[in-house]
Image: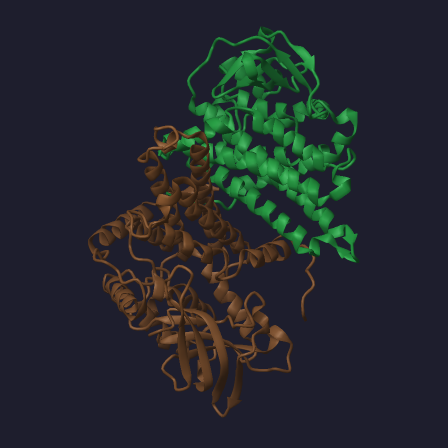
Amino acid sequence: MIIDLHPTEDQQMIADSIGGMLADALPVSRLREESGHAGAIERSLWNDLAEMGLFGMGIAEEDGGAGYGLPEEIVAARELGRVLASPSVLAQMAAVHLSEDNVREALIAGKERAAFAARGLGGEVLLFDGAGADHVVLLSDTAVLASCEMFDWQSAVSMDETLTIHRSPHTDPTEDTRSPIADRISLLLSAALSGMAHGATALAVEYASQREQFGQPIGSFQAIKHQLADMRVRADAADSQTMVAAVAFGRGNNDRNEVAAARWLAGDAAISNAKAGIQVHGGMGFTAECDAHLFLKRAHTFASLGSSRRAEERRLLDQQ
Amino acid sequence: MRLIEDPKLDQFRAECRDWLQDNVPKGPRPAEGLALREYDLAWQRTQYDGGWAGVSWPEEFGGRGLSVLEQLIWHEEYARAGAPPSASMFVALSHAGPTIIVQGSDQQKRTYLPPILKGEENWCQGFSEPGAGSDLASLKTRGVVDGDHLVVTGTKIWTSYAEGANRQELLVRTNPDEPRHRGLTWIVCDMDLPGIDIRPITAMSGVTHFAQVFYDEVRIPLANVVGEINKGWNIAMTTLGFERGTGTIAHQIELANGVERLIEAARGTVDPLTNRSMIDDEAIAAKLAGLRAEVMALRSLTVASVSRGMREEVPGAEGNIPALYFGELTRRVNGAALEIFGSSALVRDGAHNWPLHYLESFKWAIGGGTSEIRRNVIGERVLQLPRGPRAI
């Protein structure tokens, strides 16, 4: 199997158009203001995102989608991660793969909305940026779509103050076995995490190029430069593995293994790079006004969705 | 990103596999010295006779003239078949040859390339010096023009497989008045010239495959200069770029096999602490699973690197990313056996010889550019960070 990771014309166009739109409409700096929290700006753009074909990107044209595949979804998810878009945007892209015809149409058109939920300890369910959502993409080791109304939501305070958490004691009885769709969603999460890892790197590189101490930019010092190089390597490793897994998906490779590796690497890259980014920013990195901490909080949120790191490790060892 | 689906490539892969299955040498391979050189040359000759030498090298010089994709497939199948590492042929096949293809004159291509592919000549490298390691541009070995010769005096170090090598890619200072990298020349040195003295160096693993080479007024024809005199730095950078090309795929697959050997051994070993298989230990399982993921990432970084390679004639600075990842991961993979298996892993003549792999693994984060230098290059040439303080 020979894989070319260079973007195709379509993929470059998707990266440019969605990346450009997100950079304008959803700059990371929006999260400094409360008006940018809880996915509020994302919700106001929902129709635009639907019109760009984002939600149905990986759905065939005869089923109402844009007719692209998983690699194109990966390109879009990476851009969403880079600007720390609300998890509900990615949840909508995931939900279309779990839904029946009429619901899928409404999701693709942006007329109904979905949000991610994760299974926590003791069977509780945690919902992220779920205000006004119709559907829940409930992730554990499996992925199922459920109506938001099936749960008894109570508001909670999130570590990531830029998004909302609701928790419900409800234990969903429909525990499925892990499906290829769960793997596909796991790759979308990996792509978003890779985007965060790249975003945190870019932020730290920019700071280290400008911030001067001892009469020169701190990025000229090896102690800083080498951390930044390691950040880039981690982001590239996660990104490359995610792309390879996406291109090979459903082509007779060991998808479970490839996806587990992507997810394991991307979770590590997003969290490690966010931590390193805070350190590179020094005292400013510890403040609320610097954007570095936003990458850390969002990385932890996305890394906690779906199967755990320990489950990925088992999957990596069990099959080959 | 896309799958390249081409029945011709599938056919090519099948042909590689069939030929390798029938022709990969089965007997024991000498560990070092002239016997190893003879073995490597004979195997190269076998590949040439079979029509498999220089898959992506130009046809007029004995290669197949195919694309980087066929070359990639060949390297993958080569490693999968358990074919011998290129070892004493490495510099010729992955350094000097590709450099001459891009930068050499027609005469130089005709002179140097066919004997490499035919397994008649092997090459060694003469870049580093005792006083010029990471700071390669500070090298002092002098080359003085005398008529139509360059007279070379000085010393080079870490020259792998110098003993018996036919030729050397040699980097010397030809203009001491120019600063650092501006007065250097890349020249082909025949290793049988008078005035060359080779002194072997034994590595910490006990293996002796590199040497220090001394030059005492060695007269090399000026016709051997590749590129222009005093313009050798760019040629050398081309050479080092190729070191990180598809030729590393064999190392990478060997590393993946190393992780599989660790997992097999952990499965088959009873943990004295629990009386169960060692793979049932959560910490050991997590470590091995992580290594497996990282080996897959290394493969994917190489796929990314090859994807770039299809679009550039000379490898760029991004090649340091898989190279750094490989060096650091190799150290960890080969150190894992000692962490997991304790004192039994210290035995050199056991089923695995973990100590040899462990001790040899240190070189991958040093040779061809230390991890620290690679981080500098990634920082400055990939991330465009400001340069650090250094001599001009």
Give x and y (percent) for residue A317.
39, 32
Q: Can residue A237 be spotted in the picture?
A: yes
- Count of marks placed on residues: 0
The colour scheme used to paint the residues is: by chain
Residue at the image position 55 percent from the left and 54 percent from the top:
B318
Question: Residue B95's x, y, as percent?
Answer: 43, 66
- What residue do we see at 72% from left, 33% from top? A25
Q: Is residue B21 above or below residue A300?
A: below
The x, y position of residue A259, in whole percent, is 46, 32
Which lettered chain is shown in brown? B
Q: Colour of chain A?
A: green
Q: Residue at x 59, y 54 (%)?
A: B375
Figure quadrant of the C terminus of chain B:
bottom right
**Is residue B19 shown left or right of residue B115?**
left
Residue B280, picture quadrant: top left
In the image shown, does A279 or B120 lie closer to the viewer? A279
**Residue at 63 percent of width and 13 percent of height:** A167
Q: Between residues B361 and A132, which one lies in front from this camera angle?
A: B361
Q: Position of residue A277 (x, y in %)?
A: 67, 42
In this rendering, position of residue B134 left or right of residue B280: right
